[in-house]
Image (spheres, grey):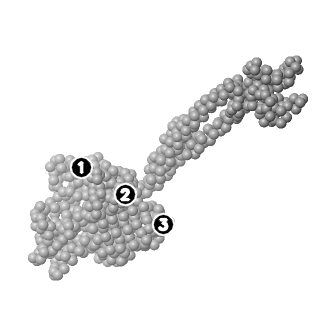
Amino acid sequence: MRILVIEDDDEMRGFLAGELEAEGYEVALAENGRDGLMQAATGDFDLFLIDRMLPHLDGLGVVQALRSMQITTSVIMITALGRVDERVRGLRAGADDYIVKPFAVPELLARIEAVRRRKTFKSDQSLLKVGDLTLNRLTQSATRGGQRIPLKPREFRLLEYLMLNAGVVVTRTMLLEAVWDYHFDPQTKLVESHISRIRLKIDRGFSRELIQTIRGSGYRISADTPA
Amino acid sequence: MASFRLAVLGTLFSTIGAVIVFALIYVATGQAAYRELAPIVAGDREDILSDAISDQLSVAQEIRLTITQGADHTFYALAGRDGKIIVSSMPMPDHPQTWHSITRLQDLSMPAGVSRIDGIGAPLTNGDMLFIGEDASVFAALNRHIAVIFAIVFGAMIGLGLLASLTIASYSLKRVRAISDASADIMTGDLSRRIESYGIDDELDVLTKDLNNVLDMLERLVENARQVTNDIAHDLRAPLARLQERLQRIARRAKIHHDLDLETALEAALAQTDIVISMFAALLRLAEVEAGAMQGGFTVLELGELVRTVGEEFLDVAADEGQILSVEAPTPLWVRGDRALLVQMLVNLIENAIRHCPSGTAMRLSLTRTPEGLARIEMADAGPGIPEAERERVFQRFARLDRSRHSAGHGLGLPLIRAIITMHDGTVTLLDNHPGLLVRADLPSVARVGSSMV
C-alpha cells in the first residue's frame, strides 16, 4: 500500500515516514501543497495524508483540487488542536477522515486501516456478520448462534460501527466521534462502560470472544482467534 | 432619587425666600401707611376737639354731627369710661391706644365699602376714649395687588424651578442609570461594554470618561491573561506533538529491542502526555467558546430530548462507579443554541458529578421550566459539595478544590460549562443541595418554531 504524506514540518514528516514504513507501508513525501498536489495527481497512491496548514496551497485546497480532478483516493486530513470548524470544513472539502495533531501513532494507524477498509467494504448491506454474530440493521437487532440479543439504540450503533470495521482496530476517539458524535474527550469511562455492556450481551456464554481489547490502541471485533 | 430630593430642597428654599421678601414688603407698606395716615388722624382729632369748642357742643355731639354730615374717609368711635360706646361710625378696637390696622377680615362690623381702617385712640380730658381711624382701603388694595403679583411671580418661579430641577434630575438619573446598566453588563462578563458619553464635559461626563478608562485597563488585563493562556496553549501544541512523537519513536525502539522496563516507563510517560494534550484540547475549546466564534451554528432545538439522550448515556457509567443517576426531563423546552456545545456542556455537568462523588451517591439530572419561562437544567448530587466560599473560585481555569487534586480531570469542566451557558445568554449558579452540590443552569427558552405560543 502506497501512502503520500504532504506535511511541511520536517520533523513531523520524518516521523510519519518512519512510523508508516515500520508498519510496512510504502511512503512518498511532499513538503508543500503545490508539490503534493503534483505528486498526488501523477503518482499511484492508495491514501493521502495531508496536513491542513501548508505553504503555497493549503490542505483544503489540495483536497478540493484532487476531488475536482475526479481523483477519489482516500484522504486523511491532519488538523491542529482546538479548531472544531476545521473538521467540518475538511470533510466538506472531500476528506474521508481527519486526525487531530498531536496524535498517538496507533490512532493514525487505526484510521488508515479503517479508511482503507471502508473503500473496499460494501457498507450498505442490511445484514452484518462476524462469525456466528449477525446484526440486522433494519430491525436494529442482533442474533448470535440463533439466539436473539436485545440492544439499546446506542449499543446497536456501537456494535454496528465495530462490525462495519470488522477485523480492524477502532480507537476510543474513533468510537466517540462515530457513535456518539462527541468531538471532545470525556473524563469518565463512557466508552468502556458501553463496551462492557455489549460484551456481556454478545460474548457471555460463548467460548469465543468476538470483541477484543487491543492494549494501547482500542477495540476490534473479529471471529479469528486473537494473536 | 437623590437628585429628586435635591430639586425639592431647592424649591423649598426659594419658597422660603419668596415668603421673606413678601413679608418685608408687607411690613414696608404697613409703615408707609402709618407715616401717611398718622398725621391725618392726629389732625382729625385736633379738628374735632376744636370744632366742638367753637360749636359749643360736647365731643360726642360734634362727632355725631360730623358723621351725619357725611365724613367719607374718617371714622370715629367714642366710648365712656365704662367702655360703653357713646357714638361710633366704626367698631372700637381692644387696646385702642396703639396704632391699629383693622381689616374686614378681623371685624365684620366695618362700615360698608371700607376694607381697612388705620388709626389710634386717646383718652379725652373727661376720661372718655376716642378712637379715630382713616380709610386705608387703598393700602389694603395695594397689599392685595402685591400679594397677587407675588403669588403669580413666585408661583411661576417655583413651578419653573421645580420643572427645571426635575428635568435635570431625570436627565442625570437617566445617565446614572446608563452607568449602572453598563456596570451590570460588565459584571456579567461583557468587558467590551462602555458607558455612553454625552460630550458636554460636565461632572458626570468626566466620571464616565474615568470609568471607561478603568474599564479599558480592566479589559486589557483580562484580555492579556486570556491571551497568555491561549498563546501558551497554541505555542505549546507543536513542541507537545514533537514530545509525543519522540516518546513514541523511543517506545518503538524499545519494543524492537525487547526492553520491557523501558517500554513500561515510556507507556507511563505517554499516558502523561495524553493527559496534557486532553487538557490543552479543553483549554483551546474554552478559548474558542469564550471568543464566541461558534455562535454562527445556533439553531432552535429541543432541550428535553437532548438532556434525556445525554443523561441516558451515563446511566451505565454511573452504575459502574456504584452511583445512582436519574434523568428527568418531562416537558419539551425549545432553546436557541449550538447542539454540539450544549451536548458537551451536559456531558461536563454529569461527569463533574460522577467524578467528584463517592460510590453509593445518588444524583439527578433534570430539566424544568421556571415560572419566568426559563429552561432550567439542574445537576444535583448528594456528594461532598463545595463550600460556599469556594463556589465562585471553581469557575476559574484549573481551579480545583484541594481534596479533589488527586482525582483525574483537567479543572476546566466548570469554566467550560459557564462559558457555554454564557454564550447562550444563560447563567450558572452553584447551590447547596443539603447535602451535596446543585449546579443550576438557566437558559432563555423560545417558542417552538411553527407552533403557537401556549
Q: Secondary structure at mark 3?
A: helix
Q: Nearer the viewer, residue B249 or B319?
A: B319
Other-residue count near label 1 (Cα within 10 Å), few / some / many at <14 / 14–19 / ≥20: few
Q: Nearer the viewer, residue B221 or B340?
A: B340
Q: Nearer the viewer, residue B281 or A31?
A: B281
Residue B388 bears which disc, if any?
3
Q: Which residue is mark 1?
A: B450
x and y percentages locating residue A185 in the rendered image: 32, 64
Q: How far apart are the two marked residues, 2 and 1, measured between alpha carbons? A: 23 Å
Can marks 3 and 1 be said to lie on one chain?
Answer: yes
Q: What amino acid type is highlighted by mark number 2?
A: Pro
Q: Which residue is mark 2?
A: B371
x and y percentages locating residue A218 in the rendered image: 25, 70
| Residue lying furthest right | B125
Q: What amino acid type is highlighted by mark number 3?
A: Glu
Q: How far apart are the two marked residues, 2 and 3, measured between alpha carbons? A: 26 Å
